[in-house]
Image: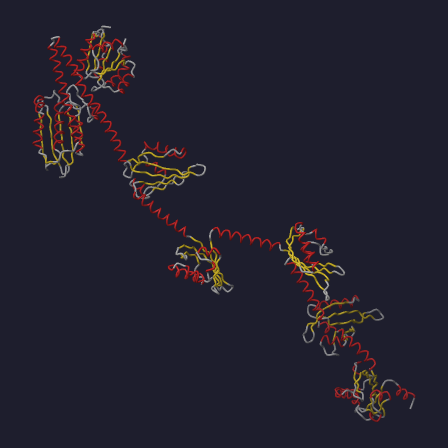
Amino acid sequence: MNSVSVLIVDDSEEDRYLLNRQLKDTGLVQTIIEKEDGQQALIFFKEHEKNRKLYPGAFPPLLVFLDINMPFLNGYDFLKEFEPLRKEIQAESSIVLMFTSSEKNTEENDAMAYDFVKDYLVKGQFSSEQLRSRILELD
Amino acid sequence: MSLLADAIHSTASAIIVIDVNGSVVDANESAYQMFGYSKDQLFGESVNKLIPLALHQQHQQHIETFFTDKPPTTIMGKGRVLEGVHKNGISFHIDIRISSFDRDGTTYGVANIIDLREEHAMSRLLAATQEIAKIGSWRVDLDTNTAIWSEMVYRIHEVDTGTRISVEDGLNFYVEEHRPVITKLLNKCIEEREPWDIELKILTSSGKERWVHAIGKPVVNNDGQVVGLEGTFRDIHEDKLNRLEKENALFKLKRTEHLSKMGHWQWTLAPEKIEWSEGLFELWEIDSKTTPPSLKDHNKYIHPEDQERFFTTLDNSVLKSEPYTVDFRIETPSGTKHIHAEGTPQFSDDGTVTGFFGTAQDITDSRASFLRTELLNTRLTLALDAAKTGVWELDLISDALSWDDRMFALYGIRKEDFGGAYDAWANGLHPEDRAKSEKEIEDAISGKSAFNTRFRVVWPDGAIRHIRALAQVISDRNGFATNMVGINWDITDEIEQDEQLRASNERYALMTQGSSVGIWDWPDVSEDYEYWSPKFYELLGYQNDELQSSLENFGNLLHPDDSERTFAAVDAHLSENTPFDLEYRLRTKSGEYRWFKGTGQASRDESGKPVRMVGSIQDVNERVISASNLAKLNEELIQFSYRTSHDLRAPLTTSKRLAEFIALDIKENNLEEASANAGKIARQMARLEELVGDMLDLARADLRTENDELINFEELENQVKERLSWMIEESKCTIDFDVTLNDEIVGEKARYSQIIENLVSNGIKYRNTKNECMFVKVELSDDNENVFINIEDNGVGIPANSQSEIFTMFKRFHPTIGSGSGLGLSIVKKHIDILSGTVEILSSDQGTKISIVIPKTVR
């Protein structure tokens, strides 16, 4: 599992940078794609034909790190749209990991209700090592 | 003389010869003896000497007539009894036959006189007998149509004896109604030889009514022909009247006994005999032709329960020879009768009991009415007792007032202290009511008005009681008021209750008026009608009765969204008795819906079935609205604290991690990366600074710490431009201020300043770089009431789908363009709200125009 492709969806440039760097530290990731909000991420999946060519072997990304608080289309709204879409575009291999600074249980529960959401990570509370084990635990 | 001459002298008849002058010229021996005269005393004397003086004149005329007519032998007076007078003056009855003869040219009269004294004595006896028996005899000669009456018959008819009477005359004496009866009997006797015997009434010649007993039979000759009638005639008047009176008395007794349902009996001891009156037979319902039952037979008739008493009473009476009185029942074919019997022994002169006499009367009806009266009396007493009603009676003639015991209780007087006079009542009256009540009594007595009044009485202990009085005047047959009967009862409690009820009603009215609660009353839950209190109407903005109070109209006023749950709550309360207490909206007259708190409670009958429901409404609109505002505010606060904590922490977390990387980069001598990351930290810190600044502004916006001051908008413009100078320079935007104010504006300068600065900064931040000339225009103007702030730009505008969230905190519509805190417009809105202003935003991709209206502050 050292050739994982990752999509980071977060409006904060700094947070994307930090996660990007931590993911690289895990040594498990080969490709990292970044999107600034849910809207852009959705478009990225919708344009699956183009992106399969653009990112050979990396599309659909295996892991999607999804922030909740984002303009235009927040994390929840993205999940709602993505649920049917991933079947439609044969992206069912993609799993989502919530990546947020919110520690609210309600938010966690709402997100985890989707079977393709596998984890809920709070920003700044894990090291690269811990991130590595969490990814490995996903099997 | 001759043999004849001697014969004449020896005959018993007296023969007297007279001349035409009526002088006696010759007489025989019998004549001298008959009249008591000698030959010398009689010769040459008038024959009148032998006639009673009263008849002399009449007799003289007869003689003259006789010598003129010279009739053959004639019976004087046609056989009538004449009277002669003896020398001694005693008159006596004689019979005379006279004849005449001529000798030597002279006419002489000869009278042949028979002394009737013998015959007369017999006749006297008969007359006396007739006199005593008041019986007369009569005879009718049909040939001559002549009636021959005896002296008594004449007397009975009060007709002079000897008056000639024809058959018709005789019949005419009978009273008119009896005349046909006797005529018929007479004819029947003549035709059929049938005798008669009858009692009839005649009218005497003087007009007196007499009852007579007439008996008649035919007189038949040798050839068997009816030639006459004869019979007796008797005055029975007194007898008849006595008999009639007796019959009448007996008849009356019978009627009396019948009508009074009475009877009497007579028990004679020796020989023993029991006699019953018809009335008694009728009472016992036994045939009156049968023998009356004996005392012993009475066990057949007397009611078994009464027999012992009956027989004991009667035995005692017989034993002690005392009168008795006993009531008992008898069984008759028509049913049981209540009998009241009284009896008394009868005594002979020597004091021995000869028998008993008694009466019996049917008292079944009177007993029933007596029992009824008793029952009514008992009921009346009970009713009067229960109602504590006193009865009084005033004798208007003697002014005497009588009270029953209950009256004394009503007036708080002891019976023994009461004089019984009208004055006692008047003295008990409350002084203020005395004149009025006395006048009412007078009016009642005079018939002017009915006595139906109330007054107060003062008890001896000073307590005042209210009395209700009704009375009726009783008048005699002439309409003169004689008595007044009335009743009194105490209505003090009633009046006090009325007073309490009135006070309670008043309290209720004041309460409902004064409180903010509207009352409704649904008196019959099966009907539509409801009562709504004046406050109820007022709460809905209606006048009383402007809208009919009904369940249907209540339903019409209910907000459609509240209707279903409200009626469900009513149903649940009625059927399950769940509390009816909820809030719903009602449409007021102006059309606005307001929130009301509704409560209600049903009352139920014995079976638990709801009958009536009463409830209230209370205007809770402000509370509900502010509660909902509060909820919104609360939600906002939660959001705010969450977002602030999130937005405050996020840059810190990020910066911490970046700092770690910088340390790592420096260690690895990757200085370029370290430098970039330091820049990132700086940006994070700048954002944090801005956020904290905005949060302070927002918090400050809620505080009304600043005083109103005269705002110098020129100065304000310069300050805004100064603060935004680095932004303006970088953006190359034109910022125009156009201030045209009629009045000086007074207010909190900082709020105006922040509103304008925030909006201008937004206009710059979200400028459209594709435009050659980018601008933000600020216009300030006013009228009498308001200040108008218009801020217009030709920037990118706010996406149409986000315009409803414009003022929501932490909303950023263009994250790629600006990196604000998302609080800017929230701060603007807060200031406008606090200044009681309004804001409108028109936005498209051509730009945004924000129009703000703020009422002027009156200094």
Looking at the picture, tell me which residue is in the foreground, B679 or B549. B679
The quarter of the image holding the C terminus of chain B is: top left
**As displayed, is residue B820 above or below residue B32?**
above
Find the residue positioned furthest to the top. Answer: A2
Does B558 sit left or right of B74 as displayed? left
Looking at the picture, tell me which residue is in the foreground, B798 or B326. B326
**As displayed, is residue B154 above or below residue A103?**
below
Q: Where residue B827 sits: x, y (%)?
A: 17, 28
Q: Residue at x 51, y 51 (%)?
A: B382
Specify how the rendered protein is coloured.
secondary structure
Q: Where residue B717 sits: x, y (%)?
A: 8, 30
The quarter of the image holding the N terminus of chain B is: bottom right
Q: Where residue B468 sits: x, y (%)?
A: 43, 55
Q: Where residue B80 sits: x, y (%)?
A: 79, 81
In which quadrant of the rendered view does residue B30 lie?
bottom right
In which quadrant of the rendered view does residue B182 lie?
bottom right
Find the residue positioned furthest to the right. Answer: B3
Looking at the picture, tell me which residue is in the foreground, B404 or B45. B404
Residue B514 visible in the current orientation: yes
Q: Residue at x 86, y 89 (%)?
A: B28
Does B389 sit left or right of B599 as displayed? right
**As displayed, is residue B104 above or below residue B510?**
below
